[in-house]
Amino acid sequence: MTRLQTTELIIDVPGRDDGRPLSLNIEPGQVWGVLGPNGAGKTTLMHTLAGLRAPRSGEVLLDGQPLLALKRRQIARHLGLVFQERQDGFPATVLETALIGRHPFLSSWQMESADDLALARRALTRLDVAHLADRLVSTLSGGERQRVAIATVLTQSPAIWLADEPTNHLDLHHQIAVMELLTEEAVNGRAVFMCLHDLNLAARWCNHVLLLYPDGEACWGPAQQMLVPEALESLYGQRLATTELDGAPVFVPVR
Amino acid sequence: MPSKLIKHALVALLLVATLPARAEVCATDDIGEQVCLPSPAQRIAGLSPGASELLWSAGAGDQVVAVVAWSDYPPEAKTVPSVGSHTRLDLEKLVSLRPDLVIAWVTGNPQEQISTIRALGIPVFSIEPRDFDAVSSVIERLATLAGTEEQGWAEAERFRRGMAELSARYSQRAPVPVFYQVWDEPLMTVNDQHLIGKVITLCGGRNVFGELPRLVPRIGDEAVLEANPEAILAGGMGEENRDWLTRWEQYSSLSATRAGNLFFVPPSLIQRPTPRMLQGSELFCEKLEIARGRR
Amino acid sequence: MRGYWLPLTLLAVAAAMSFLLSVTVGSASVAPADVWAVLTGQGTELQRTLILELRVPRTLAALATGGLLAVAGALMQVLLRNPLADPYVLGLSGGAAVGALLAMLAGLGGLVVSGSAFAGAMIATVLVFGLAHGTGSWTPSRLLLTGVVVAAGWGAIITLMLAISPAQRLPGMLYWLMGDLSYAGTPWLAITVLVVACLLVLPLGRSLNVLARGPMQAAALGVAVRPLEWGIYVVASLLTAVAVTTAGSIGFVGLVVPHMLRLVLGNDQRLILPACALAGGILLVLADTLARTIIAPEQLPVGVITALLGVPTFLLLLYRSR
């Protein structure tokens, strides 16, 4: 059971005051949604939690160990990150792309085994891109690429999922499918921590919410306590109408 | 209208030329241009090391006011101001030395710069001696233009006679297959059209690469091994440097190596189309004679 | 896993065949039967000299040098994530050329030229390394920019040296700059370095695959990006330095061979790197064989042939890959 914690963490957003230090406790089974307007530092937070970026102060702990003291390979065995932006560089097929999720688990001379291949194919099927396995990633649509990226992390099978806007570019059906998938991962004992732009997806699927304000202010807690209209209206500077549907709150922006 | 003018000018020139009191001198250069000077040149520029050397041979050394880089013979040439390299002339410097005759190298100087010199009104005499007769002939013509006929014609005759004697003595001797190494890295030789190729023939040698189309072909060790010359002659990067020959000592299958016919010839004696070639050719012929003696 | 052995076996067979072709033909004619006789320890003295002392070492040098350049090119392309990168893009050949030309200008030959070229290459490497590192912020684009500018500086120095050199030294210098295997003395350094580098780099193949997708993605998947990048830089530089030292700066092999292989074999570095070692060698052996024989006994600079062979092949592959 792997946990990700932060102690008095201040992320390094250039030109911004420190704001409120984050002391988060991301536990197995939890689904976190990070909400905030553009420029609030959501992506910076994701990268800091993954150890790709040094914090201004404070620490990120993976099972009690400071992230920066761990080897990248060790981190990658427990923690996966779905990037918001990705570069293609050299051409690669969909299957090859999913397979690199096994990288942290293979030694230098080791080739991917049949098990690894099966894992990757299962992940592609799960994300509804198995039929594209031999296509070059560069020839796919934005939504298809997004699903391939998620399939890569699914192949990596991390105990902690960090996902930077995993529903980007996805059509409605696939948005729901991805949220279902992440929830299922949490039910299976993993922790999910994702940035979202869609309040209603957060309201429906997340049990914990972190609100990030552009000035560095932040608050976090169980979803029901966080997702109150006043807090959200001040977060986005946007008036909202609220209703309830299917047991979850629904927020609609109004003029 | 212009043709009429030219006609008048020609008539006038002819008249002038026939006047005995005037010291006008004329000579035809190696691109067929007739160069006439109102009086023998007193300030001459030699635009190649060979041209300078020929000017001294023609007895005009005292009149040379400009040379180019690497003009090292005779030693006095080194004391004359240089106007750059033969491939890139410093025209400002050249003009400021006020030459009244420029000796250009047909294939060695940039055409554009030579045209500029002509356009500035400085007489240009272009030379390119490609055989032994041409060396003598150039010396004679330069002597004419410099007004040093007495000395120049004697030197030309000395060279002509010397080469003829060598030819009479050696050219009909038993042929010796010869490889001449003009450069080391990359390995380069000469063909029969090259002046050095002609020295080989003169001495009764047979240039194993004489038939190649290029004047200075680049070849490989393999070709030399197959051609299997009886004698190898080489220059070097200095006047007493046999380094280039050691390359061949490792090949015991070579006739030249087995017979010990690896000869050094000081490159300065044979590289330039000047009277020093007589000395170089004598050496060359002697080496081939040594090779014949070892048969 | 999926079919690494078939392409590598085919390439190894092709390498062996190009080797045999190269030792069989030359300006001197030796019948194939005689070549075989020499290789099995017989033949006349002349044949033995031609084959064993001239063609075999030169062919081995070509095989190794081509491999060095192609592997170095493939590594540079991954390092800089730029398909236009080649082993010389960071100015390494410029530094080597300045070293070699200085030695030639001083009238020195053989080993001194090689040693001086190697020193020049190493100076260029350290210079670009130091400048790109600067105050600590380091990115492939900064490395590329530094390298390209430094390379332009070397180019200017080379032109200067050519301009002030005596005419008789020019052919040697120009041939060196165009790349020429007649300078290759013994092939063993190149072969050893190629084999050692392949053993060092092959285990990194999968990490390089991940790195090719960008440093952030690579780090997220457990790659220690910075050490890997510096490692590649050092290895690629060393390979290039040895290649340039062996045969001058032969162009084109390092740029085109990796691309040709990627078009045909895909982009798995575990396959591409050993394939580059073989295919680069094959291309250079064939090019050198042509350079030695087209207008024999005259010799052409091999760099001309690599480009003449490589350009159409590459364009054809590119055209058909769409």
Image (spheres, coloured by chain):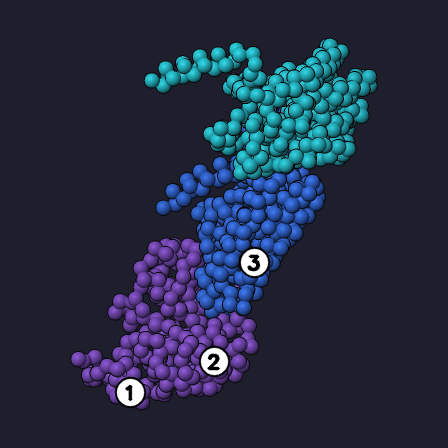
Chain colours: A purple, B cyan, C blue
Q: Residue B18: where, in percent of width, then height?
A: 52, 11
Q: Give the amino acid at mark 2.
A: Arg
Disc 2 crowd rating (10 Å Cα; few below 14, some 14-19, many 20+) is some
Disc 3 crowd rating (10 Å Cα; few below 14, some 14-19, many 20+) is many
Q: Toward which corner of the image does residue A204 lie, by quadrant?
A: bottom left
Report helix, strand or loop for mark 1.
Answer: helix
Q: Image height check: is C228 above or below B286?
A: below
Label 2 and label 3: CA atoms lie apart by: 31 Å
Q: Residue A215: where, in percent of width, then height?
A: 36, 83
**Which residue is rendered at x = 74% and y = 29% of the image?**
B266
Do the residues at discs 1 and 2 belong to one chain?
Answer: yes
Q: Are the residues at dot 1 and dot 3 in contact (C-beta closer than 8 Å)?
A: no
**Whether residue B260 can be seen here:** yes
Q: Which labelled disc corresponds to residue A231?
A: 1
**Which residue is rendered at x = 47% and y = 57% of the image?**
C81
Report helix, strand or loop for mark 2.
Answer: loop
Q: Which labelled disc corresponds to residue A135?
A: none
The residue carrying mark 3 is: C128
Disc 1 crowd rating (10 Å Cα; few below 14, some 14-19, many 20+) is some
Label 1 and label 3: CA atoms lie apart by: 53 Å
Nearest to the eye among marks 1 and 2: give it. 2
Q: Residue C195: where, in percent of width, then height?
A: 63, 50
Extreme residue toward the bottom, this view: A225
Depth order, front residue of B2/C141: B2
**Which residue is rendered at x = 70% and y = 41% of the image?**
C108
Q: Image height check: is B212 above or below A8?
A: above
The residue carrying mark 2 is: A56
Which chain does tag 1 point to? A
Q: Residue B249: where, in percent of width, then height?
A: 77, 31
Q: Give the amino acid at mark 3.
A: Val
Depth order, front residue of B233/A4: B233
